[in-house]
Amino acid sequence: MHLEKQAKKILSFPRNQAEEVQALQDTIYVIGGKWKLPIINSICNGNKRFRDIQRSIPGITTRMLSRELKEMELNKLITRTVYADIPVSVEYESTDYCKTFGPIILAMIDWGKKHKKKITGKG
Amino acid sequence: MHLEKQAKKILSFPRNQAEEVQALQDTIYVIGGKWKLPIINSICNGNKRFRDIQRSIPGITTRMLSRELKEMELNKLITRTVYADIPVSVEYESTDYCKTFGPIILAMIDWGKKHKKKITGKG
DNA sequence: CCGTATCCTACGGGATACTG
DNA sequence: CAGTATCCCGTAGGATACGG
């Protein structure tokens, strides 16, 4: 019976499956690593200060946060504004482009919560 | 004005923000790397044979596919069935648990397509 | 066809210390 | 507070070859 299914699959497979796989891989490339999505999430949630962002993301070091923020600024995901206070203060803010990751982040948060319920036994 | 916003943020921040960040990080941990989601996507789309799965995912090597499949079988994301054909054939199938990643994958495919349009200039 | 076995390396990422 | 600079390391992942 697996042979029949095999035949069916060949017929039903074509579509623009290839395009979708490519889109998926592109996205993975862009948001790859442990930190980009948590940082985006944090900033989109209103955290603006370096320290606040860091405290909002368990485990991240200043080094990684600094690196990622720099890269995200280059990629127009966030803006960086320096205020000449004493001491100087800096604010990061998300661009509209950054917010397009919202659905992905929400889907992942949702999955994570359900997954935890499954592990814990219940919510 | 950034000082006022700072004050507001502190007040509005609490919620179960922490829980959401944790859920997000958990999910990233589970589906981390370049290959897990593309493989899940491929199998959920009906690909069952090792070769078919490999051909459906640009760039993946037999080594990585083999490793990931083994791990995914351990984690009950897929089932592996061996048929004593000549030569022997193997079929991979997704479990219900595996399908819970659907929303994440769809959101990422969607983002990838839109991102390409933005890059290309239009769709 | 369905993988395993080697070999190798780039780099994501941690720890720690230090500056403006 | 807002980072940068070093040092270091594990491992994800690529290339290639081979076995059942």
Image (cartoon, coloured by chain):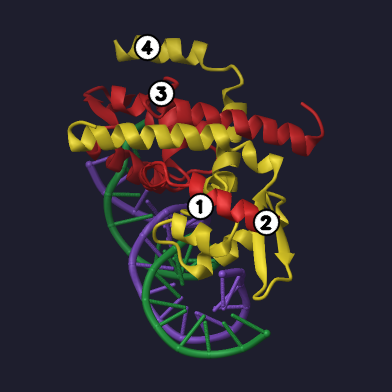
Chain colours: A yellow, B red, C green, D purple
Q: Is residue B102 above or below residue C5?
A: above
Give the residue drawn at x 33%, y 46%.
B67
Q: Chain of mark 4?
A: A
Mark 4 vs mark 1: same chain?
no
Earlier along the polypeptide chain: callout 1 or callout 3?
1
Q: Are marks 3 and 2 in contact (CB under 8 Å)?
A: no
Q: Which mark is residue B44?
A: 3
Nearer the observer: mark 2 or 4; the answer is 2
Sequence-first disc among 2 and 1: 2
Q: CA distance from mark 3 to mark 2?
A: 48 Å
Q: Residues within 10 Å of mark 4 (few under 14, many from 20)?
A: few
Residue farthest along the left direction in this orientation: A121
Residue drawn at (21%, 24%) of the image: B84
Q: Let me know if residue B87 appears in the view.
A: no
Could you tell me which quadrant the N terminus of chain B lies in? bottom right
Depth-wise, is mark 3 or mark 2 nearer the camera? 2
- Residue under the point 23% across and 39% down: B74
Q: Which mark is residue B27?
A: none
Residue that mark 2 sits on: B2
